[in-house]
Image: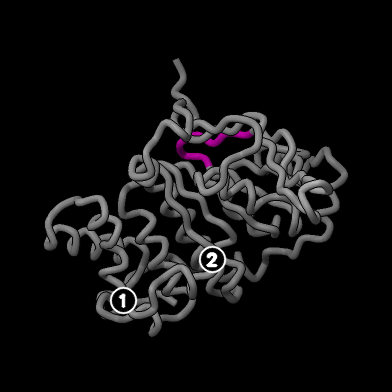
Amino acid sequence: MNAPAAIGLTGISHHYPVGGGSLRRRRFQALRDVSLSVSAGQTLGIVGESGCGKTTLTKIMLGLLRASEGTILLKGRPLDGYSRMERARLLQAVFQDPYSSLNPNRRVIDIVAQPLLIHRLGDARARQARAATLCGLVGLPERLFDARAAQLSGGQRQRVAIARALALEPEILICDEPTSALDVSVQAQILNLLLELQQRLGIAMVFVSHNLAVVEHLATHVAVMQAGELVEMADTQTLIHAPRHPYTRTLLNSALSLPAITEHAAGSAPTPGTAS
């Protein structure tokens, strides 16, 4: 019997109320009948232009927003069947802006150890040791462990955010535009880091982006969204080389090429002491 998908969505629709008074209230359909799944070891790239529903879908996956219709399962169980603490052990996120997702006044080592403290895992010494291991895993040198987040570069902050997301050993990692706020060379380093971590840890990853070129570098499968609908989904190579939907072809024709990213990626493995 096959294991259930790490995360699976079936018939997800969502609307937001818009307009004036209650007698004239209308609904904006942000998502319409979206179904997809991601298994352990897979990276699903979700692409589409701004306003296509990617952010709403991400919030629903994280349990931050309740879908108007449809079901979402984590490892075969309804999302609502998990407590917040249980869900956090299975599902973690890396957000777009590392400048706002971290407390600027806290030390790096304490930020990474915070999830362990909240979940009461280990004593203080064990938490610090685990945090140091995670910092090394994402390529942060020891000299930065006691630095404040405000003292770090954008790439270094995003490495801290990734280390924190991995602290509870989640089975699913959702990355919402995690490189869009970074310059091209640092984007390459973070993409390479995520790819290496996914391959090493075997987690399921959802990578949300507006850039098909970035998704091509990272994802095993791609879902294309347009105006709240999932218009095409396939393994990455099939979708890139034989797209079926006209919108997918439009995205491919307008996508920025990846030579700058792949040039940097070749030499951007997360070696401690070289993090940018």
Q: Estimate the x, y position of residue 84 in percent, counting from the top left.
A: 38, 44
Residue at x-position 55% and y-position 33%: 72
Residue at x-position 39% and y-position 41%: 87
Check the picture and name the quadrant holding the N terminus: top left
- What's the magenta region? 36-42
Q: Estimate the x, y position of residue 50 in percent, counting from the top left.
A: 74, 59
Residue 71's place in the image compared with 111, above or below, is above
Can residue 98 be found in the magenta stretch? no
Name the residue beneath numbered marker 1. Answer: 106
Residue at disc 1, secondary structure: loop
Q: Which of labels 2 and 1 is toward the front?
A: 1
The amino acid beneath tag 2 is Ala
Q: What separation in Å lies between label 2 and label 1 (alpha carbons)?
A: 30 Å
Q: Nearer the viewer, residue 102 or 4?
A: 102
Q: Nearer the viewer, residue 88 or 24?
A: 24
Q: What mark, if any, has residue 265 been given in the picture?
A: 2
